Amino acid sequence: MNFLRKTPWSPYAAGILLGIVTWFAVLTSGKYLGVSTTFVRATGMIESFFSLEYVASLPYFLKEKPIIDWQWMEVMGILIGAFLASRLAGTYQKRFTPSMWEKRFGPSKMKRWSAAFLGGVLVMFGARLADG
């Protein structure tokens, strides 16, 4: 178990483990790993609090129901796994922003958050455009 505490983890070992997990997911459930639909569903769930009728009438949400499903659990697993990995490796920091972001974008939180938000929007757009 010492390999879990190695800093940083080998990208080759992590890639092999991810490949095994993906293979196991396809073998047991017939589904590939993916998370982009989860964020769209989360948006639908949040929007449902304000206008359930509107969300229920949208064709996209008729196809992709805004529910908590296995992909939601995958996203939670990614968050919990990343936290546990950083704790095991001893690299956990009680910082919201990595120091490399502060070096690149300066001390302004608004500038860093805007860059992160824009990057997330572009990645999500690309993922949805490519159908995951």
Image (cartoon, grey):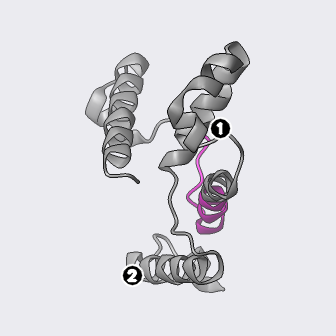
Residue 82 lies in the magenta-colored region: yes
Name the spot of residue 52 as percent of width and height, x first. Answer: 70, 20
For label 1, the residue is 66
> Does residue 63 sit above or below 48 in this rendering?
below
For the residues labelled 1 and 2, say whether their Cβ atoms are less than 8 Å apart: no
Q: Mark 1 to mark 2: distance in Å?
A: 35 Å
Q: Residue at x 58, y 67 (%)?
A: 89
For this rendering, which residue is in front, 51 or 68? 51
Left or right: 82 in relation to 111 = right
Q: Is residue 112 left or right of residue 36?
A: left
Q: Residues within 10 Å of mark 2 (few under 14, many from 20)?
A: few
35 in the magenta segment: no
Task: Out of 60 and 38, give the one closest to the viewer.
Answer: 60
- The image position of residue 96, as x and y in percent, is 54, 35
Look at discs 1 and 2 and give the one toward the viewer: 1
Q: Name the residue rendered at 52%, 76% in the picture.
A: 22
When asked about the image quadrant of residue 129, the answer is top left
Residue 10 x %, y %: 42, 78
Lateral position of residue 28 relative to residue 26, left or right: right
Taking the spot 59% from the left edge, 82% from the top edge, the residue there is: 24
Badge 1 amino acid: Pro
Tag of residue 26:
none
Secondary element at tag 1: loop
In this rendering, does residue 47 appear at all?
yes
Q: Give the quadrant of the C terminus.
A: bottom left
User: What residue is shown with label 2?
Assistant: 12
Residue type, label 2: Tyr
Instruction: Give the magenta range.
Output: 81-94
Compared to residue 68, the image places residue 59 above or below, namely above
